[in-house]
């Protein structure tokens, strides 16, 4: 079997090889990261004391019996937030991506790259070119591109790709738009590779992305899904795209990195993910016909597929060295739609996730995912309540809200430190306005998404 073809691998940025299957190691960067987090935490504490934030909150909450009742729950939520961040940071410091030595001796598995496209005439050919330009044996590579009922020249660009790459690419064309989920399903059913790789057609994969995303599936039989790292292709377009570039990096290089340590990455993104065929084969029909609250689920397909892989006892991992570059929203309208789409999917799949991760006895690795899941979801109501209180505090004392914004900026700075440690660039500073922006301008997304959870329109494509 090809799983046994790899006999040696090492951690990235390390000179020696280790014959172990878990990506745990420590280096000098960990000490630097600990110092940065400690200094940032100290800054928040100093600001809290100097600005007298806690006494003012106590005074504000004590101004009415209703607000006073919220004092202790809010204090508990902050304690949980700090403990949760500390818990995640410890896991994050243990993460390292897998990489190979002597790759010429590896018998690489056959892979099928599934690329659904809808009205992507400007980007689809570049996306396909990047796949064939990646470092992977051509005779082990199969690309299946699906035109999901486009009404532009997407199909024409796919035909051009067929002329360029011949037998290595297959084209499927839908007469009408059926949605990304069914496009992926048809591509997977028509594929023959041992590994299924999904790539969005508005993206470009890095040179080593295909080999790197396959590694966990080569080395670890229990791993069924692997998430790649999604970076902003249009990062320098404007201020918003620069902020989103930091947000994407933190979501992957921190969020998915610490989840990878316990083998429970919650979302393997459509932009770049790899799946073991035997892990998704038995669940394809269930996934393609998913129904929630009596209606068919046409979107949120990446989170749904990852959920099913985890439910069946497989691990999901993250490879930070498997990079794909994708277009991020460049205006607030697109950003609103993205947040609503993500949040609806998150709520739906979190309900499904909770049913099996907490109750299922067959999942040996369910404890850390369940704990992390509870940490994250416990804080949502308090986050909304806290945001509401910040707005209400303006009528209590207009200057008080300025102090809260300063405190919020310091919290965003701490989160941005994770970006600084991994990317080592001063653009981490864009994470601060992003944190303030999402808190003050997108607080409504969660309750709105909850109330419109079964809305057929998912505001995409």
Image: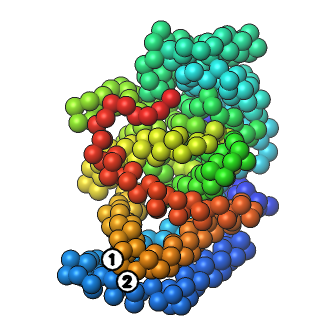
Residue labelled with disc 1: 74
- Residue farthest along the left direction in this orientation: 65
Residue 156 place in picture, x, y as percent: 66, 10
Vertical side of 152 occupied by 59: above or below: below
- Which residue shows up at 73% across the image and 39% down it? 206
Image quarter of residue 68: bottom left
Residue 454 place in picture, x, y as percent: 28, 37
Q: Earlier in the sequence, mark 1 or mark 2?
A: 2
For residue 282, the mark is none
Residue labelled with disc 2: 57
Name the front one of labels 1 and 2. 2
Residue 314 visible (yes or no): no
Residue 363 place in picture, x, y as percent: 35, 52
Q: Toward the viewer: 429 or 213?
A: 429
Residue 254 place in picture, x, y as percent: 57, 60
The answer to whether mark 1 and mark 2 are in CB contact below 8 A is yes
- Which residue shows up at 42% across the image and 44% down it? 340
- Which residue shows up at 40% across the image and 73% down it? 394
How many angstroms separate mark 1 from mark 2 (CA)? 10 Å
Tag 1, which secondary structure?
helix
Q: How many marks?
A: 2
Residue 187 visible (yes or no): yes
- Check disc 2: other Cα within 10 Å, few if <14, some if 14-19, many if 20+: some
- Check disc 1: other Cα within 10 Å, few if <14, some if 14-19, many if 20+: some
């Amino acid at each position: 079997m090809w799983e046994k073809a790899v006999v040696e691998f090492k951690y990235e940025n390390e000179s020696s090889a280790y014959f172990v299957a878990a990506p745990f190691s420590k280096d000098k960067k960990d000490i630097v990261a600990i110092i940065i987090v400690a200094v940032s935490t100290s800054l928040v504490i100093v600001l809290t004391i100097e600005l007298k934030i806690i006494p003012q909150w106590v005074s504000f909450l004590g101004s009415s019996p209703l607000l006073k009742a919220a004092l202790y729950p809010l204090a508990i939520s902050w304690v949980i937030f700090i403990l949760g961040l500390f818990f995640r940071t410890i896991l994050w410091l243990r993460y390292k991506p897998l990489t190979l030595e002597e790759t010429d001796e590896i018998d690489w598995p056959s892979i099928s790259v599934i690329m659904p496209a809808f009205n992507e005439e400007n980007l689809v050919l570049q996306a396909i070119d990047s796949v064939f330009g990646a470092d992977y044996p051509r005779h082990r590579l199969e690309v299946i591109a699906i035109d999901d009922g486009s009404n532009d020249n997407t199909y024409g660009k796919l035909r051009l790709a067929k002329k360029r790459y011949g037998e290595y690419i297959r084209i499927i064309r839908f007469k009408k738009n059926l949605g990304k989920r069914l496009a992926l399903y048809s591509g997977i059913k028509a594929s023959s590779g041992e590994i299924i790789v999904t790539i969005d057609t508005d993206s470009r994969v890095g040179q080593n992305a295909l080999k790197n995303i396959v590694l966990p599936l080569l080395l670890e039989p229990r791993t069924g899904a692997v998430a790649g790292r999604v970076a902003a292709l249009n990062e320098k377009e404007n201020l918003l795209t620069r902020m989103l570039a930091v947000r994407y990096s933190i979501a992957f290089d921190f969020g998915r990195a610490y989840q990878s340590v316990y083998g429970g990455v919650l979302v393997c993104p459509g932009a770049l993910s790899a799946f073991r065929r035997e892990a998704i084969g038995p669940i394809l029909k269930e996934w393609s016909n998913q129904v929630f609250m009596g209606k068919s689920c046409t979107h949120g397909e990446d989170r749904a597929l990852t959920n099913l892989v985890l439910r069946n006892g497989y691990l999901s991992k993250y490879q930070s060295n498997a990079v794909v570059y994708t277009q991020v929203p460049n205006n607030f309208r697109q950003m609103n739609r993205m947040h609503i789409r993500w949040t609806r999917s998150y709520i739906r799949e979190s309900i499904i996730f909770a049913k099996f991760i907490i109750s299922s006895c067959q999942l040996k690795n369910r404890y850390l995912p369940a704990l992390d899941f509870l940490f994250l979801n416990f804080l949502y109501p308090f986050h909304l309540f806290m945001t509401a209180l910040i707005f209400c505090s303006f009528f209590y004392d207009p200057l008080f809200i300025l102090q809260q914004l300063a405190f919020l900026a310091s919290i965003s700075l701490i989160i941005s430190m994770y970006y600084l440690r991994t990317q080592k660039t001063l653009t981490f500073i864009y994470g601060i306005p992003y944190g303030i922006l999402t808190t003050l301008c997108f607080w409504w997304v969660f309750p709105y998404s909850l109330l419109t959870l079964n809305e057929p329109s998912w505001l995409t494509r």
